[in-house]
Each structure stands twice: as structure tokens, then as C-alpha cells.
Image (cartoon, rainbow, N blue to C red):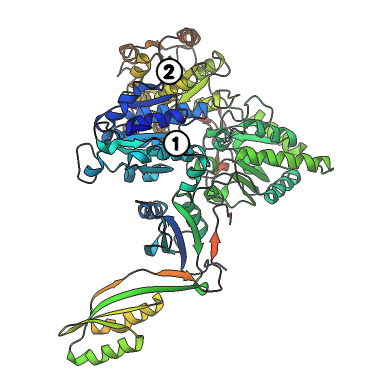
Amino acid sequence: MQLNGSQALIKALEMEGVDTIFGLPGGCILPVYDPLLDSPIRHILVRHEQGAGHMAEGYAHVTGRPGVAMVTSGPAATNIVTPLCDAYIDSIPMVVITGQVPVAAIGTDAFQECDTIGITRSVTKHNELVTSAQDIPRAVREAFHIATTGRPGPVLLDIPKDIVDAKNPNSAMEWEWPDDQSILEGLPGYRPVTKGDPQMIRQAAELILASTRPVIYAGGGILKARAAEALRELAELCDLHVVTTLMARGSFPDDHPLCLGMPGMHGNYTAVTSMQRSDLLIALGSRFDDRVTGRIPDFATEAKIIHVDIDPAEIGKVRRPDVPIVGDCRLVIEELVAVLRGMLADGTTQPDRSMWKQTISGWREKHPLAYKQSEPGDALKPQFVLEQLRDNTPEDCIVASGVGQHQMWTSQYWKFNHPYTFVNSGGLGTMGFAVPAAIGAKVGRPDAMVWAVDGDGCFQMTAQELVTASAERIPVKIAILNNAYLGMVRQWQEMFYEERYSEVYLSPDLPDYKLWAEAMGCVGMRVDSPEEVESAIQKANEIDDRPVVIDFRTDSSEKVFPMVPAGQSNDAIITDPALGEGFVQ
Amino acid sequence: MTTDDATHHLLSVLVENKAGVLARVSGLFARRGFNIISLAVAPTEDARLSRITIAVDAASAPLEQVTKQLFKLINVVEISELAPQDAVERELLLVTVHAPATTRGEVLELVADAAGRILAEGEDRLTLSLDGHPDKLDGFEELLRPYGIIELQRTGRVALPKIDHTPNRLTPAQAS
């Protein structure tokens, strides 16, 4: 079948099961937008290319399917670099297609030319400049294969205009869809290991059954591997407590008695301290990120480590494991459960862990997450808003967040009882992530209610995508925790820079968020007092034909606690000084 | 046997012979802070593949991370570690050295001793070549230095495993 390159590209995307593309056309990618008119693929026209990238990420987060974004060359390609980097560090499967100047013009500093491949090389799992129309189907299949297998990640295809321009002879091609075998042969260096080494799994089982203070350190890999059920089976089989990192929230239900919640810099006391005092950390799809470990030499010094990860480079990168297992988290955990069942059936017993369990419940009782409720007439507490949001939305509500204080409060105060319900930017910490990511999530899961919890600083970075949401009838709901500051920076300046506030004030009224929301076709609301919170949320929940933005005016001085100061030991965790606890050593 | 206690690790990296692969490898080294001592790239007996021979500063990075990160590049097909005692290493040196009549005899003697070659002769200078183990080239360079080196260029080393020595072929999942 004779096709031109642009037809082949759209057909290849259809073959890959793509139902949605987030994008914005421009000169070089223009030819591809023509056959798109005849395709069943839905295109969401964004207002800025960064929005397309984060929407694709949000879509991928909640569906597990790769998000797809398509933008033109030059400035459009550079605008999508941030989402690529974000997806790379958080292992989000994504395929980005960028236009490029015609092959013959590459390297001549042509209009809207940039070295997209060079610029994105270090923020993609792989990228390719496709130089012949005939290569398009293969390149697309490879891109989806690479993005979704092994450790998932973003893949970029750079497509020169001449090979997709129907009027250019260079776009002529004979359609052929490559089979699995030819894709494998075309990637001789890419063979992700998914099955764990049985010997290592056996050793892991032995360590687990011998440990007295074990903790499962569950990371984002659990979600990527669709391993939440397997994780639950493992935890319940051996009565193991579980901490869920920022990227793993929801992978183990917060309401489960064995769940300790989030560890790390703003983790709760029990999660942080149980890891510190454990004698065995079972790291599943987690990467010993500095925000979790605190000062590395002081991290969980008595713990032996079992480290399961699909990316061999993560194993031993930060902490040398006693039992390294390269493999897919779900497959490895299932194997591990089988071995453990066998050993337990053969009469191996677990040591008495009642002391450890008592210690943990003692910590929980003594150091719950807490904040000081506002007095009548005082400013609204952000934590209160989150509690109200949590309690007035369906349990499987999807929540997206930006980056900063509001993100940490969301992780702390929401109850994540289902996987794939928390969408946020962990590794890169991309402010402005929430609005577009929530839109992408809602497109991927139109059946679910989607809220974004955003900061006023974050909101101003990507709010224009609410125009996209209004135009495309994507009814997301945005709760801005408007404290008039770059709150996390303000918190650091208060705590570590002697209250010298440098360039962190944003003003609560500029912009007027309600008017801005309305100008973008959303319903805008403003909430100042605790009494108004619930009814505003209820009202927002009832609106299903357009986006809603609520400007919650919150207390500027509220800080996120607990906190482990950057670069310090996790033992230096500070619970809220306002609650009279000060440093707990 | 690994080269863990040596000052450098010598890696022989088989990559797909595609545009931009060298940039991926060198970009990775720059990004992760691995120092390259020398690097040589050339096609192999298989036209689809190229071989990159890299000497990595052992002090800058553990070998394990270097190889694991390299394996993450989609175009990297195979990595072998060549321990010095198990490999033959060669490098080529070109040098133009001062050699007026007064010292020319001595220089020619050095060239003859080292089994080097004279590529060009000028009135007061000679251009020479020498190939051999990098250590040998280091020594030759030192011997020539007092005579006045005008220009010098080395290629970076290439290496193959010695016959009867199996190279330490690494796999991505190798944990340590």
C-alpha cells in the first residue's frame, strides 16, 4: 500500500492503539495534521507545548498507557523539554513527536530549526531523527516498545518536514508494519531483564523470614509494574509494614493497618523512623532518592537491604544491597511470595516481632500528623482544606498536584487507597505540573472525578491550559491553596535563612484568580473561611460541564511538618515546633 | 580479574553503527561525571556495529556504574572489560621534533631504538611515527622532549583481548 509519510505516521499511531494526542501544530509538523482530520484519534489542542507534555504524562500516570504529544520544531520542541525531563526522572511512558526542518535544511540554522535530538538526548530514554518516510512505521513501533518496556520512559521522534509532506517526493513510502521479531532484531542492545534470579529471590525470602524489624520501602516501580496486588499479598503474608514513597502513594492502601504512609523529607514520623530503625529494608521499585534517605551515611544504618528494580543501574547506585534483584517488580514479588509460602508451609517460622509492632504503634500514637486548627476569624489552614477535599470526594477520586508545600500536604492528608489516583511530579519537582497533568488524567479516565491541588505560584505557570480544558469540555477541578507566597521557599527562608524573605511574595489578589478562571471559561470561586470550604467543594463536585477553580485563601505562615532539613540525617526529623515538640532526636 | 585497583578501566563497547551514538556515549560520560582518558571509535568486521574503546579514569567513577549506565543506552550492544594483563593495547603517535644537524643523529638513534618511522624530513625538524603500547609511547615522548617537540598527536588506544584470554563480557543485570 502506497502512503505518504504523514499518513504512515498517523496510521502507525493508530496501530499502537493511541486514542489521544496532546499537541499544537506549527510549520514543520503541519503536514501530519492533515491526515489527523480523518483519524479516529482525538487531538487535544493545547495552548502551550509544555501543557501537551504534562497532559501526556497525566494520561500515562492514570492509564498506564503511554501518553502521546505532538508539536512542531524549534521553540515547540524546546517547550516540551521540561515534560520530557519530568517523565524521564519519574519513569513515565511517553512518546513525543516533534517536527523538524526538511532533511536537506538540517544544520543550516533554518527557520525554527533546533538540534532537538541533541537537546533531548539526556532527558529521554531514547530519541531518533527519522530521515526517511519508509522508516516511520519501524521508528514508531520501536518508540512505543522502548517507552513501555523495561524501566518506562519518554521517547522522542524527530520528523523532518519533507518526509511527511505529501507534496514532496521524499514522503513516498510503501506501508509495512514491522512484526515483533524485526523490532527485536532492530534493537540488538535492548533486552530488559524482567524475571528475577531465583537464587536471589530465595535469599530475599530467607532474609525476610529471619528479620525482626522489616519494612517494605515501596517506590513508584510498584505502580509502573502494576504490582499493587502482589505487594499487598507479600505484606499480608509476612505481616510486613509498608512505607509508600511520594511516587508510590496509593500502591498500598493508606487505610491498611500495615501502611505507614510516606517516608522522606516531609514524611510522617513513623514512616521515617521505622525505616531508620529497621533491620531489613525491602526496597521494591524505589531508588534511594535523597529526599527519602536524608544524609546517606546515616540512613537506616542497621538495615540489610533487598533491592528489587528493573533498572540494573539503580541497584548499588546509592546503597549497596545485600540481595540485589534485577527484574519486574510484579514478577519478582509474585515469585518471592511463592517461595515464602513454600518456606512457611515447610515449617520455617518468623521471629516474634511483637516488640517491633509495639514500637511502631507507639510512634504512631505519639507522633501523628497534626496541625493547629485556625481560631475563628483566623486564616484558613491548608491542611483543613485538604481534609475537607478528601472527605467530600469519592474514594477513587484522582488528585493531581503541583510542586511545593501543597504537594506535600496533599500527600500527607489525602487518603490514597487506590493505585493510580495520585499524579504528581516527584523527581524533577516541576512547578506548574498540576493543571495540565489533571487535564491529561481526566482525558485518560473520563469516568473518574479529577481534582488538582495547586499552589498559587504553580498555578500561574500553566493556568492557560484551563482554556484548553474549557474548549475541550474536560471538567477538571482546581483547588488553589493561595497563600500568596512561593510557600516552600518561604518556609526555607523562615527556617534556614533567618526569616530573610527574598523574592517569595506573590500577593493573594494579583491576579484575581476568580476572574481569571472565569475569563478562561471555568467556574471561579473564592473561599476565605473554614465554614465555606465544604459547600464550595460540593458545588464544584456538581459541575460537570466545565472546569472549576476555587481560590482558597490560606494561612501564609503555615509550614510543612515533619521536616528533615536538607542534607541532614533522618534522625534529625523536626515535628511541628508549634505543637511544642521541637527537635526529636 | 578486574581492573578495579588500576588507575583506569579499559572498556570495549560494541555499539550500533548509527548516527549520534558517539554523542550519546560521550554525553553520558559528561552528564554522570565519568572522566575519559582516551577514546577511539572505528567500524568493526560487522558493518552494523562499531567498537568504542574507552579508557575511563578509575578515580572518577566505579566501573559498575559506568557499565550499567552505558547499558541503558539503547544502541549499546555489548560491553567487555579488558584488564591490562588480558589485553593487547596499541596506540599511534605522530610527532614533529626539532632535529638540527647537531642533534639529528641522536634523534635518529632514538627512533631506531624504538622501532619508529621517519615520515618526513625538514632542514631542522623530523616528523616521526611510533605505534605500540601506550606506556611505550609515553616513554618515547619523554625521550624526545629535551630535543624540542614542535607538534604531537596521539590517537587514543585500541585494544583486543589476548589470544586464549576470554574478555570479561559484562551483562546489564550484573549486580556487582
Q: Which chain carries label 2?
A: A
Residue B36: x and y, percent? 39, 62
Relative to the observer, which residue lies in front, A468 or A271?
A468
At label 2, counting other C-alpha atoms closer than 10 Å, the crowd grade (few under 14, some 14-19, many 20 or more) is many
* B150 shown above or below A187: below
The quarter holding residue A353 reads top right
Q: Residue A177: give its label.
A: 1
Total labels: the figure holds: 2
Which mark, by number, is residue A478? 2
Residue plotted at (59% across, 24% down): A418
Is B60 located above or below residue A494 in the figure? below
Front in this rendered view, residue B44 or A527: B44
- Is A533 positioned to the left or the right of A34 in the image? right
Quadrant of the image containing the N terminus of chain A: top left
Distance of label 2 from label 1 (alpha carbons): 42 Å
Amino acid residing under circle 1 = Trp
Residue lying at 40% horizontally and 52% vertically, measured from the top left: B28
Q: Looking at the image, can residue B171 be seen?
A: yes
The kind of residue tagged 2 is: Ile
Location of residue A310 in the rendering, given as x and y in whole percent from the top left corner: 56, 44
Q: Can residue A463 be seen in this view?
A: no
